[in-house]
Amino acid sequence: SEARFVQRWRSRLVQLPPGCSDLGAAGRPTKLGLEGMGSTDEKMMGKSLFCLPRRLFVMLLAAIALLHGVTGLLHTLLIKELPGEQGAAAWQSNDHCVGHRCHDVLTCRGTRQASFHTREVLELIGNTVFGYWGLLGAFHGYTKDLQWFSQYLVAFPLFLFLLFLWDGAHCVVCGEYPLNVIDEALLWKLPNIPVKEAAKVELTEAMVAYPVGFTNRLVGRNVFLLYTAFEACWGCFLAYCANQVRLHAQFTFSGLLGLGPTYDLGDWRESVALARSRKVLAGGYQGMVSSDPVIVL
C-alpha cells in the first residue's frame, strides 16, 4: 500500500528541476509533501482592501493587534490602571465604586465601569495571544495559527454585541451612560474627533457619572446612537478581517483550487536556482533534496 501511495504522489507532481524531489532518502514522502507546508506564492493570494497583498494585510493586522495588546498590558502593569480609565475626579469621589472594596455589585454605581473593564481585559489579552499567533502564522505559513487568529476575529464582534446589550440595559435602567459607551463613542485619540477636546477633558477629568440628557447636551449629539454606529462599523470591519485571514489560511494550505499550494513555475525555478547558488557559494551544497517546496497541480 505504501508503494501505491508513493506512486500516486509522484503522478501528481509537476516535473521538477533535476535533483529536486519531495521524497526523502528512504523514498517516502516528506512532511513538506504530505502536509503542503510550502505556502502559495504571494501574488496568487489576492489582495485585501483592493490594494494590499493579502499576506501583507494579515501580517499588519496581526502586528497591530499584538502591539495594542502588549502596550496595553504594560500600561496596566506600570500605571496600575487600564487604558481609558476615568480621571482623578472619579477616583476621589465618594460615588466611585470599583475593586474588592466595592459591595454595590448589582447597582448602577457598581456596574458603571463593569462592561468597560470586561472589554479592556479580554481585548488586551486576546490581542496579545491571538495577534502573536496570527503574526507567526502569516510569516511562516502556519495555517493552524492563522485559523486561530481568524476565529478570534469572528468571536470578538459577537462579544461586542453582548456588551452592546449590556450597555443598553444599563442606560435604560439607570438613566446614565456606562463608561464603555463614553470610551467607545467619544474618547477617541484623534484630536477634536468626534467631539471637541474640551468635552473630552470634562468627561474624563470632571465627571463621575454620565446622565443621558446632560451628556447628550454637553457633546451636542445622541451619544448612544454614535456608540451604536461605531460598534456596527467596527464589527463589520472585524468580520471582513476574519474572512481575509481565513482565505489566507485556506490558500496557504490548499491553494486556489484546493489541490495544494499554488506556485508560479517560473518564479519557483528562479528561487530554486538562487538557493542552489547560495549553497554552492557557501560551500555547503550537497544536492537539493526534501527541503525544496513541492509543486502540486
Image (spheres, grey):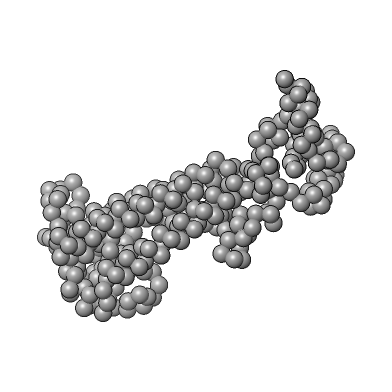
Q: Residue at x 55, y 40 (%)?
A: 144
Q: Residue at x 36, y 63 (%)?
A: 231
In-image side of 110 versus 244 (left or right)? left
Asked if residue 30 is positioned above or below residue 191 in the image, the reply reads above
Which quarter of the picture shows residue 206?
bottom left
Residue at the farthest top position: 1
Q: Residue at x 58, y 43 (%)?
A: 143
Pick the residue in front: 222 or 90: 222
Measured as percent of width and height from the top left, residue 106 is found at: 14, 50
Which quarter of the picture shows residue 210?
bottom left
Measured as percent of width and height from the top left, residue 1 is found at: 72, 20
Measured as percent of width and height from the top left, residue 295 is found at: 75, 42
In-image side of 195 versus 17 (left or right)? left
Taking the image as drawn, is residue 60 in sight?
Answer: yes
In-image side of 151 versus 269 (left or right)? left
Asked if residue 18 is positioned above or below residue 63 in the image, the reply reads above
Measured as percent of width and height from the top left, residue 229 is found at: 35, 68
Residue at the farthest right position: 18
Q: Residue at x 27, y 77 (%)?
A: 221
